Image: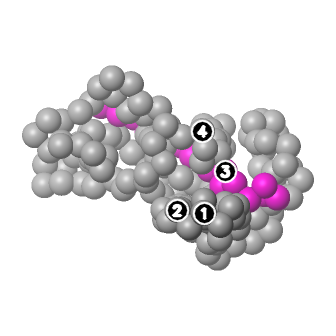
Amino acid sequence: MVMRFLTNASLGESDLKLGLGKEIHPSLEFPGNLVTQIPNELKLDCFSYSWLEYKGVYYKKKVLLVLESYLDQCVFGEVIFILVGKSKIPYFLVKRVYTVGFDSHFHAFEIKIDNSDLINYTELIGCYISELSNTTPTVARTIGNFKTYATLRYAT
């Protein structure tokens, strides 16, 4: 980052590394109510990827992102689709995960996650990576007590 500043180089495409992907047409492949939520640059054509690396952080389908955070609560979303348009800024379509609360013993948020492979398009919400309150992804972990938790990197 310091090198870019000193050389006056931009934060170009080198910040974005893309995995396996395919070109999609959301207006044809997604239901109308979901297409209305998607930004204009992605409505006609974009690419859907299985994973990407943005500014050194690795994202893939099924990881959890922090959509909102409050004083002692977080709203998580599970990544279902990763879309990238002409702006080269990742856009995530996620399904909300129910947060039970923070478990101080495990230093993690207890969550209820739907593990079915069926996608309910009416429940998906979208956001650009720049709109996230915390850009660090996490994963759902099931511990010996058969409860599922999501940790944050700074939870201590």
**Residue 118 can be seen, yes or no:** no
- In the picture as drawn, the residue positioned furthest to the bottom comes out as 20
Q: Position of residue 40 (x, y in %)?
A: 85, 43
Per the rendering, the mark at residue 6 is 1
Disc 2 residue crowd, few under 14, some 14–19, many 20+, Cα 10 Å? few
Q: Amino acid at mark 2?
A: Val
Vertical position of residue 77 compared to residue 115: above or below: above
Provide the residue designation for mark 2: 2
Report the front residue among 68 and 143.
68
Where is residue 108 drawn, in percent x and y?
23, 42
Q: Position of residue 32 (x, y in %)?
A: 82, 40
Labels 4 and 2: the sequence-earlier one: 2
Label 2 near label 4: C-beta < 8 Å?
no
- Looking at numbered disc 4 in the image, what kind of residue is underneath it? Glu
Question: Which is more toward the observer, 106 or 89?
Answer: 89
Q: Magenta region: which residues?
A: 83-100
| Residue found at x 66% / y 50% | 91
Give the CA distance from mark 1 to mark 2. 6 Å
Report the label total: 4
The residue at which mark 3 appears reads as 91
Q: Are marks 3 and 1 in contact (CB under 8 Å)?
A: no
- 90 in relation to 39, above or below: below
Residues tagged 2 and 3 counted as in contact (Cβ below 8 A): no
Q: Which of pointers 1 and 4 lies earlier in the amino acid sequence? A: 1
Quick one: SS at disc 4?
A: helix
> In the shown orientation, is residue 51 left or right of residue 12?
left
Instruction: Examine the structure image and report whether residue 23 is included in the region drawn in magenta.
Output: no
Q: Nearer the viewer, mark 2 or mark 3?
A: 2
Crowding near pointer 4: few (<14 within 10 Å), some, many (20+)? few
Q: Evaluate whether residue 90 shows in this view.
A: yes
**Residue under numbered circle 4:** 131
Drawn side of residue 140 relative to residue 131, left or right = left
